[in-house]
Amino acid sequence: MLHHRGKCLVVFLVLITGIRAQAQTSSISNPLNGRENNPYSKYGIGEMVNGNNVILRGMGNVTSAYAHPFSINSDNPASYAFLRRTTFEGAGTGSTRHITNGTDNYNTGTATLSYLNIGFPVGNNAGLCLGFRPYSTMYYSLTDTILSTSIDSVTRFYGGEGSLTLPYIGGAYKYKGLSIGVNVGYLFGTLRSTAALRPAKDTGINKGYTAEFSNYNRIGGIYWKSGLMYERKMDSGRYTFRIGGTFALNQDLVERNSIYRVSHYNFTDTAVHDTVYNSGERRGKLTMPTSYSVGINFGKTDKWNIGIDYAGTQWSTFNSVPDSSLLIGVGTSSYKISIGGEYTPDMNSIRNYFARVTYRLGGYYGKDYLRVNNSDIPYYGLTAGLSLPFRRSISRLHTSVDVGRMGLLSNGLIQQTYVRFSVGVSFNDIWFVKRKYE
């Protein structure tokens, strides 16, 4: 037993190390930093990141009422009470994105770590989880050239980078069919936005100044999310019906904002940097918005299940006291409708391996939290996935693919077509069980 646990941990760490190494070298748009150039991440706190496990990604992210004895649904912490084995989970995601405004086109992509989770049952009616997941990411790099007959041409540059990350601990307790749970974590990160005017010819002897305007926001604070789930068995346990939901109120994080105005120029072969203005650190609050979800799930035990979800966030309550620029482009609300399911032909089959494979399909439609040029930003996509069992084990290799589209080609906006491929593993073992001797 101990040998098996150790082997699982070693494989798990090797996988995550490999994902981390790949993330440093796989970007199409910027091979040095492994980040995906997304102009829409310029607004608010960047692009929201999907932190759900690969199982749920393959079935459209129907998370509100999904629970499984051998996998972790971190989106609804009430699901932890249904765990029956200690479970390790980790995954990485590779993505490509085609961006167009109708005339100009470019491709970008990246690979990165998706999440790390460990969950375990506590008795028959409770469960705990420790996890780590990205929350949002920002990376954009845009340039435009201004032509002039009186002065040298200059280039306008707009760039940003950063991310928010959420390590957390969660717990749940179940009484009869009703489970309640909560995740509590520390949401933190740094977001930087920069605008600059640069001489088009900036090599050699050049006394032309580059003017750079940078904005830093360092964010950190406690962040929680609660969940409820009710399960009812029917037809002597052959079928299961669940209804569930999640809820998070407005929450204030500490925000530290700094503004810099810097000039750069080349004097012969020496680069000169001069800080023209430094605001110092301004401390305030970043108010995260109220969010909620509700869903239902129905299935036949060890065979199939299907679910549907609705999730919404009231971005009208989002606010930044020290930096009002974070409010630019943020709309009043966002929503997402998801539907998906999974099917396992025969999980107990001995002769046919593919009968033990779980197959998943799903889809979603929603409106993003951004509102740019007085236009909402819609998105939609289709998902598919597989869970491949390891030999003589309930541990599995999971894959999913998400093909979708975001944005519009009207009103000066851009449209993105993306493909996200995720690979994850789940290792299961029995911990904290009293041994019996006869």
Image (cartoon, helix red, strand yellow):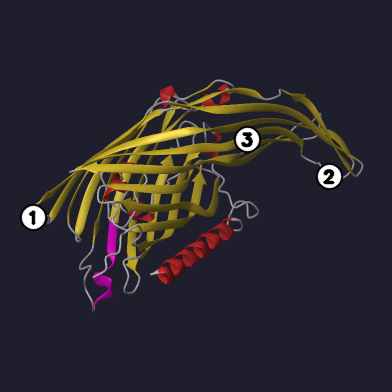
Q: How far apart are marks 3 and 1 (CA)?
A: 57 Å
Q: Distance between the residues labelled 2 and 3?
A: 26 Å
Q: How far apart are marks 1 and 2 (CA)?
A: 78 Å
Query: Residue at 63% across / 35% down in the picture?
Result: 192
Work out which quarter of the rendered image holds the C terminus and state it: bottom left
What secondary structure is marked by label 1?
loop
In the picture, measured across the screen, residue 206 lies left or right of residue 422, that is right
Which amino acid, by three-letter code, is at mark 2?
Thr
Say which mark, if any, is on residue 203: 2
In the rendering, at what x and y percent does residue 427 appear? 38, 63
Q: Contact (CB < 8 A) between labels 1 and 2?
A: no
Say which mark, if any, is on residue 192: 3
Q: Which of 169 and 297 is in front in this view?
A: 169
Say which mark, if any, is on residue 236: 1
Question: Which stretch did the figure color magenta?
Answer: 352-360
Query: Residue at 23% across / 77% down in the picture?
Result: 350
Q: Which of 114 and 117 is in front in this view?
A: 117
Label 1, residues with CA under 10 Å away: few <14, some 14-19, many ≥20: few
In the rendering, at what x and y percent does residue 163 appear? 55, 41
Q: Which residue lies furthest to the right in this view?
A: 268
Q: How many labels does the image show?
A: 3
